[in-house]
Amino acid sequence: MIPTVETPHALAADEVCARLSADADRGLSAHEAEARLREAGPNRLRQQKPRSIAQILGHQLKSVIIWLLAAAVVFSFVIGDMVEAAAILLVLVLNTAIGFWTEYRAARSMEALIHFGEVRTRVRRDGSDRMIDARDVVPGDLVVLEAGDVVTADLRLIEAAGLTCDESVLTGESGAVTKSTHPLDGKPALGDRVNMAFKGTAVTRGTGLGVVVATGMATELGHITGLALEAESGVSPLEVRLEQLGRRLIWLTLVLAGAMIAAGIARGHDIGTMIQTGVALAVAAIPEGLPVVATLTLARGMWRMARRNALITRLSSVETLGATTLILTDKTGTLTENRMSVERYLLADGDQPFPSEGPAGTTLGLALRIGALCTSAELDGDGEKGAGDPMELALLRAAREARVDVADPDPTTQHAFDPTHRMMATVHAVEAGYLFAVKGAPEALLPLCTRVAGADGPGRLTAEDREEWVERASRAAQAGFRNLALATKTTGSGSDEPYDDLTLVGIACLSDPLRAEIPGAIEACRSAGIDVIMVTGDHADTAARIAADAGIAAADAPVLGGDELDGFDPATAADETRDLLRRTHVFARIAPATKLALVAFYQDEGQVVAMTGDGVNDAPALKKADIGIAMGQRGTQVAQEAAHMVLRDDDFTTIIEAVRQGRIIFANIRKFVVYLMSCNLSEVAIVGLAVAIGLPTPLLPLQILFLNLVTDVFPAFALGLGKGDGREMQRPPRDPDEAIMAGPQWWRVGLLGLSLTLATLGAFGFALFGLDVPAPAAVTVAFLTLAAGQLWNVFNVRATDTTAWRNDIVANPYVWGALALCLALVGGAVSIPLLSDVLRLPFPGWTGLLCAGAFSIVPLIIGQAAIAIGRGREG
């Protein structure tokens, strides 16, 4: 049995080694390491099983409408109607193929986590260092760390010489974490366990040695992986609504078909004929084009968003964006640039904002020079990127921007950053002797300074002066800045003690700057009725400052820390806790499990939650949220593959555009559903009423299917391509529980369906009894009347606050193209002999054509009159 250590950060390093039966000098023996590997297993993360092709295909067949159509196919084959069966089957294949293709590239959430284990690492075994595959690391191994290494297991540090690690992918904190080896009291947060190095993080500076305390899924990264694998990705609101609509249609179809068959048999009609008519009624009731048009509309929205740098990984997520009521946003790399920058310098003669003109020869110039000299980081040629600690890189950029000359020789001596004393120093040979450049935490460096640099030269630094400097640094820290004190001295020997008798130059105040576009984006969210909440792993004061600058919360708004939410469970939370969460807009030091709990809490509150993030720690919440939004440039691959949407430009404003597109798509879906349902209702009513009053059947099953494929699908798809009226983001989000078909929509469906029914039956009766047209030709008149009436009906689904001539439907070129195509196809159904024979549509004569044309205008007139009368009733 491999020994374990529950809280390695709380124990001394030698005690951890003892409990793990590990030699702190020689490491494990090769034999012991092999035995532990057999017992513990490979040091790799569990992989989520990829969705198979069969699973993706199965997802396309879950719609109840698809099931009902499949049943119609089977029934048509049974009764020998092969043409109708083939036609319905074609619809099924088309819809399935489109859905399969668009979802084939869906996120395989946690596969990317495996890459963290696909590296090699240096371990010490049998007293010598060797490189091994990371998957072969075992508990008790000694791992040697150097700058640039990826940590491959959770380590309790034994040695740390200037060691810093970038843990932003785990904690969300910007900036490297300085490591030490001393035991820690209490239960510090993950980001405060400075004597630990965690799997998946990167060494940015220094060297270290650590003993492995956890591998694979037992690591902190493994825990996050487990959370992400277990987090359930909810069904999108659109899928729920379409499913509800489909179930209603099934019951409606069964009831109508049963009633019609019973009525026909009661009137003495042949049972077989009635069953076939029942099939016609079922085909009429089912909007075969609904799944196809919905899929194509969403796919079109997905492609449109991709052109705007928003990549959608799940088709139904396109519409869900439009229902978003709450965005939970990370700070680092999402609201901020994930790049430290110098904001100001605290100097003896006052606070000096930066950048500032002409620092040469001034105290500011000296501060810039000391900050640039006292570093182990390096900038690249253009200064945008570099290697080293982000704060040191920021000081180098500041000096370069101010054109400060730092062309001194390389340091003769470098005193690496000491995490215990929290200072570092470099020594440079200059004409006057040796220049010591020193920087460190203000509270550590100020007591060592005896003088302070000023415009008139160095002056004496008194105890009262030090207290004033401490207060100035404290105010800067409360404003969210990270502070570095800068000091210097010049002596005749480079071997002098670096940390005594120093001259204080100033204090550099650094921040991770807010993206310039964020305040405008937050305001746009508010205008659209979307609330924004910051959830970050960073410090509370930094989070509060960024939130205030972004406009997320007031400067004095409360910040809720992760320790206050430790163990938070929405299911058991007290009422006062829930009330506190409803009032809080800034959460700091939040662990991955708490992020998951917060997403679940807001979803329980009825919110449609969008979650933004870029780190490994965000993956579980991204997957759980209704819309998980990952950053494409700075985001980890893990976050991107767990998300529903990836921002290629990392621009928060892209989310606003995506929400706008989502709202447009829902409005378009509602339009074409009203259009389809009114057309299909008319077909049901036409067949049902004709049978009920003893008329011949005015429409045959194959004719109805032809209409559903032609006059339904193309105009409906054209409606789905509408670009909106430009007022989408001036309206509040719709109620998340609001159905696609609410009361006003059903009223409109009923009115439009009834007008189409009366017009078609009127044309059929007039042709049959008024014009003495033969029954087969009268069926053609009914067919043409309904076809044309349905095409004109597309203009009846415009918004009630628009005019007949100025609305997004009239302005939609796809609508006009669809009408032209459909008219040509309907004309071909009557004029092309082969097609007219299959559909049983003989030419009705010119009088029949005039009759169909005249009656087809009636529904358009009724629909437009109803909109004018009921203006303002529906929006």
Image (tube, rainbow, N blue to C red):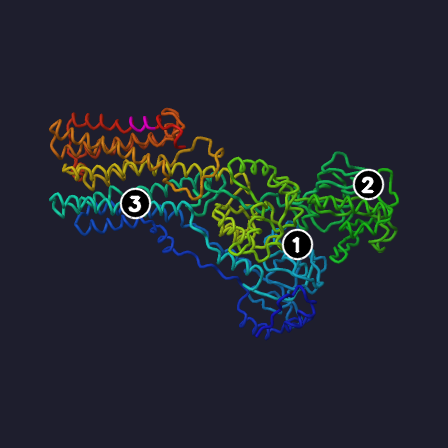
Residue placed at 18% from the left, 52% from the top? Answer: 78
Q: Which amino acid type corresponds to the residue marked 3 in the rendered image?
A: Leu
User: What segment is highlighted magenta in the picture?
Assistant: 861-866
Q: Secondary structure at mark 2?
A: loop
Residue 775: where, in percent of width, then height? 12, 34
Specify the quadrant of the image occupied by residue 713.
top left
Where is mark 3, residue-wise? 249
Q: Secondary structure at mark 3?
A: helix
* Above/below status of 52 relative to 83: below
Which comes before the other along the chain, label 1 or label 3?
A: 1
The residue sitting at the front extreme is 575
For residue 348, the mark is: 2
Query: Is residue 757 at all visible to an observer of this figure?
Result: yes
Q: Which amino acid type corresponds to the residue marked 2 in the rendered image?
A: Ala
> Could you give the CA–CA distance between mark 2 and mark 1, rounded to whole angstroms?
33 Å
Q: Which amino acid type corresponds to the residue marked 1 in the rendered image?
A: Thr
Q: Secondary structure at mark 1?
A: strand
Specify the quadrant of the image occupied by residue 55.
bottom left
Q: Which of the two marks, 2 or 3, is nearer to us in this view? A: 3
Residue 620: where, in percent of width, then height? 52, 54
- Badge 1: few (under 14), some or many (20 or more) residues near its Cα, within 10 Å? many
> Could you give the CA–CA distance between mark 2 and mark 3, rounded to whole angstroms?
78 Å
Q: Are marks 1 and 3 in contact (CB under 8 Å)?
A: no
Magenta stretch, main secondary structure class = helix
Q: Which of the two marks, 1 or 3, is nearer to us in this view? A: 3
Where is mark 1, residue-wise? 204
- Badge 2: few (under 14), some or many (20 or more) residues near its Cα, within 10 Å? many
Q: Is residue 184 magenta?
A: no
